[in-house]
Image: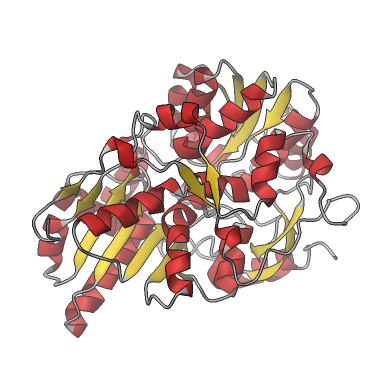
Amino acid sequence: MRKDELTKIILPEEKLPKYWYNVQADMPNPLAPGLNPQTKKPLQPQDLAQIFPMELIKQEVSTERFIEIPEEIREQYKKWRPSPLIRAHNLEKALGTPCRIYYKYEGVSPVGSHKLNTAVPQAYYNKKEGIKRLATETGAGQWGTALALACKMYDLICTVYMVRISFEQKPYRRSFMEAYGAECLASPTTNTAVGKKVLEENPDTLGSLGIAISEAVEDAAARSDTNYALGSVLNHVCLHQSVIGQEVKLQMEMVDDYPDVVIGCCGGGSNFAGIAFPFIPDKLKGSKVRLLGVEPSACPSMTKGVFAYDYGDVAGLTPMMMMYTLGHSFTPAGIHAGGLRYHGESPLVSQLYHDKLLEAKAVNQREVFEAAILFAQTEGILPAPESSHAIRAAIDEALEGKRDGVARSIVFNLSGHGHLDLTAYDNYLSGKMVDAQFSEEDLKKNLLKLPTV
């Protein structure tokens, strides 16, 4: 089978990865330790035991290269994995590029995104430890939807704190979560001390992932039957998503191709980590493959942020982590890519970016939707606004290849569909969408609030 002979590259079910790949085993520089937010001393497992099951804590700190995927989780994965790798022939033709463009389509999962890859194991391990309820946050709603379904699979109660601006922009995401049996609340709420404080200070706040995380953590810490679940950022989340990149490598082998550039949108970092991290060993052995994370110019944590210890949430309830950050009190503009409105970047992505093994670029909202429309009209899939950041970068790479006469092999992670993001598309198509302005002055003010270590 040659690379120009096939559009959809399907792995047989028996090729579903049996292990998650842990990039911590291969990092040239290990992560700086997470710090206890009260003592500011390196985290100990017991510091996390109040809100996480022990198996996930072990995965968080593990440096084993491969961690076995339990058979029960693999059986759940088989409902949508392996996901297809698709050659974008029509998009290539529309661009007139000699480049080969492939996309890994995670929208085939029951919830329409990659988030179920980690929601299932998180619910599984919590159930095994006797937890009855999970609390979480969500931006655009894809993570909240995935955890709602995973909780239903394992008979757990699920409460989701959804960032207010996304709650208002995407009402059917709430309906989706409620259909799976979850409770979905617009954050900030009056249910938590953190939410009340934020609303007292700014009743008209758009909300942020940092605020919603604080509410979910406060909720979980207050109840012995409840744990907290996070859909991105943390090491164990990136670990679970590694099935994406492992499959991509096998699929590229099937068509005798290898990527020159691997692209993913980047908010907290999980879907970019999922497709990019399995290529890190290749880079360390001399491969020229480029690994490119794409973030919104309204929330550019890598391209504008600083590499420093910071909290993962507004209230400082979470551990301090070494990461690229805009400051934990930063509230991004209300862009439609709600899943990318996070002030910080995954510590793993941050360290590898700091070590120059990863690249990053920031793009504006309107050019993202321009790319999304072209992709929908050529490939037939309406992409999520978050995923469309990767599409924008892939198109830019293909056009650069066209100008230079270089036939690059480009692979990007189409992390989800946009069927419940039609308000955003209406906004773009009607000409109402604007590019949010990023304030360097606000950045400076927020960085002054970074914790002292």
Looking at the image, the residue that sits furthest to the right is 39
In the displayed structure image, the side of residue 19 where residue 37 appears, left or right: right
Whether residue 230 is situated above or below residue 275 in the rendered picture: above
In the displayed structure image, the side of residue 149 where residue 429 appears, left or right: left
Name the spot of residue 444 as percent of width and height, x first.
70, 71
In the displayed structure image, the side of residue 233 where residue 336 appears, left or right: left
The residue positioned 47% from the left and 66% from the top of the image is 281
Whether residue 13 is situated above or below residue 94 in the rendered picture: above
Q: Quadrant of residue 439?
A: bottom right
In the displayed structure image, the side of residue 288 where residue 167 appears, left or right: right
Near-viewer residue (230 or 393): 230
Whether residue 444 is situated above or below residue 91 in the rendered picture: below
Looking at the image, the residue that sits furthest to the bottom is 404
Name the spot of residue 249 as percent of width and height, x first.
33, 57
Near-viewer residue (83 or 101): 83
Q: Can residue 144 be seen in this view?
A: no
Whether residue 78 is situated above or below residue 354 in the rendered picture: above
Q: In which quarter of the image is residue 176?
A: top left
Near-viewer residue (337 or 222): 222
Location of the N terminus (image quadrant): bottom left
The residue positioned 58% from the left and 53% from the top of the image is 342
Name the spot of residue 326 as percent of width and height, x first.
64, 63
Image mark count: 0
The residue positioned 11% from the left and 69% from the top of the image is 96
Q: How is the image coloured?
A: secondary structure
The residue positioned 22% from the left and 64% from the top of the image is 257
Location of the C terminus (image quadrant): bottom right
Q: Can residue 114 be seen in this view?
A: yes
Name the spot of residue 46 as percent of width and height, x first.
83, 40
